[in-house]
Structure formats: C-alpha cells, structure tokens
Image (cartoon, rainbow, N blue to C red):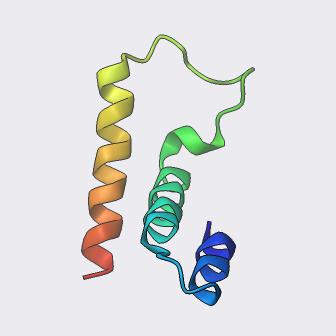
Amino acid sequence: MNEIAATFRAAHLPAGFHEAAAQVFKAAAATPLAAATRETADFSTPLSDVVALYTDACQTALQGNS
C-alpha cells in the first residue's frame, strides 16, 4: 500500500486512501490472529471478538501516529 501511495503521490493524485490502508494492514498484522493459518485458525472465535481485536489494534496504531 505504501508503494501504491507513493506512485499516486508521484502522479499528483491523492494517496490518502492507500496510506490509511497501509496503517490498517499494519495494525491487523499486530493482532494475535495474524499468525494463524487456515490450518491453525480458531474458527469458533465469535466475529464480534475478531472485530474487537482489529478495532483495538487500529485504534492503538492511530494513537501511536498522533
């Protein structure tokens, strides 16, 4: 995403979407779920718990960028 953002910036186009997506992906990679594979993932985890993990990670990442 950062490379796409840089390409957009170089073409004088808005890069904000791709910069934000890079932050979200980086935050998602910091969650305990990131290490899971299809074989090791716990599919019994409620979706609300998964969303909470990602939301917390994104909020923490955003606070670190303030």
Residue 59's image quarter? Answer: bottom left
Which residue reaches farthest right? 39
- For residue 18, above or below residue 48: below
Position of 46 compared to 25: left or right?
left
> What residue is shown at x 55% (from left), y 86% (from top)?
12
Q: Position of residue 37 (x, y in %)?
A: 71, 31
Residue 65 in which image quadrant: bottom left
Farthest residue, direction top: 44
Quadrant of image for the N terminus: bottom right
**Residue at x 63%, y 84% (from the top left corner):** 11
Q: Is residue 2 left or right of residue 13?
A: right
Q: Does 19 sit left or right of 11 as displayed?
A: left
- The residue under the point 46% across, 76% down is 14
- Seen from the viewer's position, the closer of residues 1 and 8 is 8
Considering depth in this image, is 25 or 3 the residue closer to the camera?
Answer: 3
Q: Position of residue 34 (x, y in %)?
A: 59, 44
Tell which of 5 and 57 is nearer to you: 5
Q: Quadrant of the C terminus?
A: bottom left
Is residue 15 positioned above or below 18 on the image? below
Where is residue 48 drawn, in percent x and y? 29, 23
Given residues 24 and 12, the one toward you in this image is 12
